[in-house]
Image (cartoon, rainbow, N blue to C red):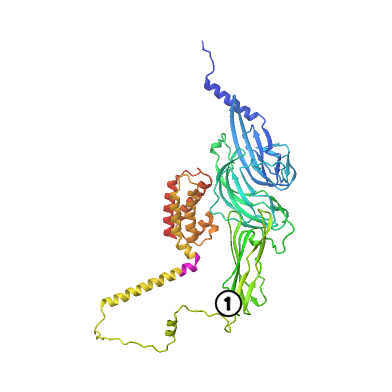
Amino acid sequence: MRKTGSMPLKFKLFSILMIGLLSLGFAAPTITATIDAKQVLVQESFTWKIEVVGSDEMPHIRLPDIKKLALLSGPMQSSNYSYVNGKMSSKKSLSYTFVALEPGSVTIPSIEVFLGKRAYRTKALKLEILASRKASSKNPGSNQSVYLRAIPSKTNIYVGEPVYVRYKLFTKVGVYNYQVDKLPDAVGFWAEEVVQGSQPRLVSEVIDGVRYNTAILKTVLYYPTRSGDLTIDPLKTELEVEVKANQRSRRTFNDPFFNSTRKATRNFLSNPIKIKVKKLPDPRPINFNGAVGDFQIKANLDTNAVFANDAVGLNITLQGTGNFKSISLPEPDLPESIDIFKPERTTAVSIQNMRHKGAKKATYLLVPREPGKLIIDPIEFTYFDLNSRKYITRSSGRIKLTVYDAAGTQPVVTSGYSREEVELMQEDIRYIKAADVHFTRAQNGPLPLNFWSSHLIGIFLLLGVLGFEYRTRQLQGNANLRRSVKAMTNARKKLKQAKRLDQDSTELRTLLHQSIAGFIGARLNAAENALDISTLISLLTQSEIAPEVVTETQEFLEGLTMDRFAPGAVQRSTDEWLEIAQKLLQDLGKEL
């Protein structure tokens, strides 16, 4: 008799797998279209996803033109297979990222989705685009992998009061480069960019429970020149970001582990900023010319006593903090007997602690025509103080000037000699005492060797001094030459600073990048604000540098940039980075 029993376990599993594959092939696929937000703000992005369940075919669509929306990125493809309770299922999706351009209601139409030769249709979706959101979230871009926000220091200010805006990048993926062509338009403001000391540094932050890498791309200082509700337009930036590579090949098992990535250039816009600017209070002083901040004024003469028709300098200095570019120095009110000439003006103002600080100076040339004691009235300057919210007037005080008649009414000025010394100077003939003089005969014959050697040494020393002076003048008159000569010294200083940092210091890789990029830029006379990787490699290629050195430089800079903005992307220790940088600097020093 044949023995009967249960089916072997391997055969059971194989049967279940075959049944699952057959059911997958004959079951009708399910197709859905979704968006990850029902309401978005203008300049805010959202994701539209087409998802197919129960088909091994990657869906294909024809993307329609949709008013009030612009395609930001896509398609992003993904595949997933699962085996649950004896049933196998597959899921494939296409994702597109759009940005909202203007407020209003938008309908994303029903579209055809092709799976092989068969066509299916999705449902239409509705989206509301808002100009502003009443209860806005702290993180309006929480659904995005990369977004840019403009963060103002304040939104309610006076005319002439500074407001600084930080343009901050939020990213969940690798960012390798950025480009800002120009500052945003800001009608009713004058603006100045705050210079950052180094490349933007990524910092990890948790925003509403989501972890981002953040960096300040730009900081701009704005001064309103008129009152009202003013708008600072969005900042546009071009970013090189990490995206998933398109997978066009058909795979039975498309494991996400094997999904590759690539770099892609994308444009991003920040949010616009509304600023409420208040008028300065009335009544305003007569001599008020729009200065807002905290100022001091000083005035003084080069000397307080001159002859008639001689010139004297009047210096007026205004120093402090405030809207220096919108104000002018007060002019002096002089007696009619003094002629005044066009002044020489100088300005030394810089941005410190997010405000302009420094001094403006005017030097007038005065020529008094009549002798006597003259009084120059106090020079006053009025400004609006933001702390007290009052107008304050500063005064230099009165200035006294004594003018002497050139005909002889001036006081006697002595030289400091005694009476006896003066009388001795007036004698024309003085007694000269003769001294006993002894003469010796000079030796005839050739000059000794030490005579010639001392003269030759003196000539060489003179030539060395002249050569050093010529070289020094060359360097002083040629900034590019001076920069080139000091290139290697500056690069080695950067490397020494990097060696002293901790292994986990975020500044270490920045110093290594500055060392190599700064050396190349200095030796090839490249502008310091144009030291991006592509420009440096192009300059090296044009300079006929050895190809292997160019390749080594490009790999080093790209790898270092990736490791700076995406920590862990390059598996290389700090000691290895330092060793490679030192060797590369030696190779470049031989070539350049």
Q: Is residue 501 visible?
A: yes
* Residue picked out by circle 1: 306
- Residue toward you, 516 or 455: 455
* Quadrant in which the C terminus is drawn: bottom left
Up the image or down, 445 lies above or below 293; here it is below
Q: Residues within 10 Å of mark 1 (few under 14, many from 20)?
A: many
Taking the magenta stretch, the answer to whether it contains residue 476 is yes
> In this image, 90 relative to 38: left or right?
left
Q: Quadrant of residue 301?
A: bottom right
Q: Amino acid at mark 1?
A: Val
Q: Which residues are magenta?
A: 473-479
Residue 49 % position (x, y): 66, 39
- Residue toward you, 188 or 587: 188
Q: Is residue 241 visible?
A: no
- Residue toward you, 524 or 138: 138
In the orientation shown, which residue stands out farthest toward the front? 419
- The residue under the point 47% across, 53% down is 553
> In this image, 126 relative to 416: left or right?
right
Residue 86 % position (x, y): 59, 24
Taking the magenta stretch, the answer to whether it contains residue 511 is no
Residue 504 % position (x, y): 47, 44
Q: Main secondary structure of the magenta part?
A: helix
In the orientation shown, which residue stands out farthest toward the bottom? 429
Residue 501 % position (x, y): 45, 48
Q: Quadrant of residue 424?
A: bottom left
